[in-house]
Amino acid sequence: MPDQNTMHCIIRPMQSQDVLSIATWMVNVPLWQRYGMTLSQSESMLHKGLEANDWLFAADISSRLLNVGFAWAMPGGAFGRGAYLRLIGVHPEWAGVGIGGALLEAVETAAASRFRHIFLLVSDFNHEAQRFYQRHGYQQVGALNGFVLPEVIELLYWKRIPV
Ligand SMILES: CC(C)(COP(=O)(O)OP(=O)(O)OC[C@H]1O[C@@H](n2cnc3c(N)ncnc32)[C@H](O)[C@@H]1OP(=O)(O)O)[C@@H](O)C(=O)NCCC(=O)NCCS
């Protein structure tokens, strides 16, 4: 487990040269394996997000340890009134040391410049992520049965951005 006291995490805009490195570990995360995510799908999704000028962030630990986490949010992607956090992930070896929280904060700061709301979907079985979002002030406001995978309920979470 990395030492939280000495770890310094840098959040920066993602660039196209980061995509392959992120997509490579992303396809080994059990959550995205369950959704059948392939390397080419994850690469193409992230490139499309960059081309669309969505908000994509990458997390580094140092100049030699790049892309240990990422977040992708779509401005106006939620009912035209809020940002939609489409994906957030941290390399499994670096989970639980605050990188996800720092990425979420970067998304919220970007969103706060234009919107009062952030929405996201989280799988019903992903209890750790649900707890993570709740701890950051998100609440469940809906549920979409079989929206992506027939056997999974996608829980709709919402956070009102404080003025
Ligand atoms: C959910 C996720 C983004 C959180 O990032 P993180 O860097 O681990 O989060 P932080 O260190 O800032 O916060 C840790 C919190 O997340 C929870 N958590 C979620 N998944 C975890 C994991 N795999 N390992 C450790 N902690 C995890 C912890 O329980 C902790 O919550 P707590 O403080 O209430 O106990 C990250 O663990 C991840 O990428 N998970 C797999 C992909 C995923 O579920 N993405 C969200 C899809 S909606």
Image (cartoon, grey):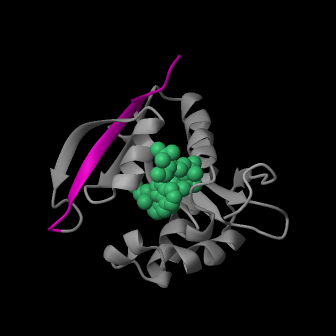
Foreground of the two, 149 or 132: 132
The residue furthest right is 63
Residue 15 in the figure: left or right of residue 85 = right
Name the quadrant containing residue 138.
top left
Residue 59: percent from left, percent from top: 68, 57
Foreground of the two, 47 or 158: 158
The structure residue drawn at horizontal position 58% and vertical position 45%, both measured from the top left corner, is: 101
The structure residue drawn at horizontal position 60% and vertical position 37%, both measured from the top left corner, is: 110
Residue 33: percent from left, percent from top: 38, 77
Residue 141 in the figure: left or right of residue 10 = left
Foreground of the two, 35 or 29: 29
Name the quadrant containing residue 38.
bottom left
The structure residue drawn at horizontal position 78% and vertical position 54%, both measured from the top left corner, is: 7
Foreground of the two, 35 or 136: 136
The residue furthest top is 163
Residue 72: percent from left, percent from top: 53, 54
- For the question of whether residue 30 can be seen, the reply is yes
Extent of the magenta region: 150-163
Residue 1 in the figure: left or right of residue 61 = left
Number of disc labels? 0
Q: Is residue 39 magenta?
A: no
- 110 vs 4: above or below: above
- For the question of whether residue 80 can be seen, the reply is no
- 70 vs 105: above or below: below
The structure residue drawn at horizontal position 74% and vertical position 67%, both measured from the top left corner, is: 66
- Quarter of the figure with the N terminus: bottom right
